[in-house]
Structures are given as C-alpha cells and as structure tokens.
Image (cartoon, grey):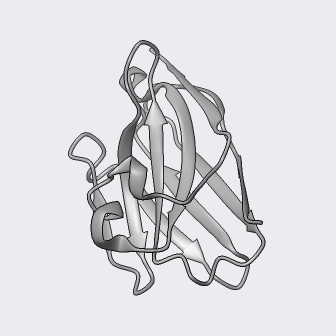
Amino acid sequence: QVQLVESGGGSVQAGESVRLSCTASGYIASSSCMSWFRRAPGKEREGVAVIDKDGRTRYADSVKGRFTISQDNTKNTLYLQMNTLKPDDTAVYSCAAARSCASAWWFVQGSYNYWGQGTQVTVSS
C-alpha cells in the first residue's frame, strides 16, 4: 500500500516562499507521473505541476515561473518550491501519483492512483 504524506505548509506573507514536500511510503517506482494539486476555498481542485520519470515538467499557467516541481527518487520525495506567493495561492495542496502519464500529464484527476491528505498554505496580503 502506497501512502503519500505532505508537509511544509503554513502561513506566509505575499511575496514570500514556501517549499512543500511529499514523502511516499511503499513502492512507487511504477509511478510514471507525480503531481501537485490544490483546492482553494470555494473552488474545485486544480492541477498545479506535474513531473514524469525523466524529469520533464509542466505547470499551470497561474504558477508558471514562480513554482518549481522536483523529485528525489533516493528519498522517495516530491517537492514543490513556491516563490513570490500571492493571496490567490491560498489553498490545500495535495500530491498525487499516477502509474501512467497519458492522462495524468494533463491533470486528469481520475487517472491518479494515490493521493495525499493535503497541507494548508495560507498567503496573506
């Protein structure tokens, strides 16, 4: 059984940075894509960033140039470096893993096999 556990959330001021971590327990070598999603208050969950096994990345337009997704396979850990945060970035951030990138690359949520519980990030102006 694979479990994903996020950490690193908190409350920050606009313009500051936060790094989120997602540590996987269990065997995830078969995961082709890993992603970060977020759910803002009153909004639907949306894809933020995705990374495949070869290190290729894709970002939502709203975070492009500010967020960076990376992974350390030796530690079974996924990261999201978030810079120049804005109040609109306030959300619960969750990591997810998919065995196939075919649809996961496009943030199709039903294509993800494992999800974390999420960590809150609050950005105040």
State the residue at coordinates (42%, 60%): 68
* Left or right: 110 as drawn, with respect to 58: right
Q: In front: 16, or 36?
A: 36
Q: Is residue 68 left or right of residue 20?
A: left
Q: Which residue is drawn at 46% across and 15% down?
A: 41
From this view, report whether residue 44 is shown above or below residue 20: above
Percent position (x, y) of residue 64?
26, 51
Residue 17 relative to residue 105: left or right: right
Is the N terminus in the top left, top right, bottom left or bottom right quadrant? bottom right
Across and down, in percent, residue 58 comes to: 28, 63
In this rendering, does residue 32 appear at all? yes
Question: Which residue sits at x=64%, y=39%?
Answer: 118
Placement of 17 over or under 2, stated as above or below = above
Say if residue 67 shows up in the picture. Answer: no
Q: Quadrant of residue 62?
A: top left
Between residue 25 and residue 84, name the one nearer to us: 25
State the quadrant of the C terminus: top left
Where residue 115 appears, as percent x and y from the top left, is 60, 51
Q: Where is residue 71 in the image (x, y as percent from the top left)?
A: 56, 73
**x 26%, y 58%: residue:** 106
The answer to whether 3 appears left or right of 122 in the picture is: right
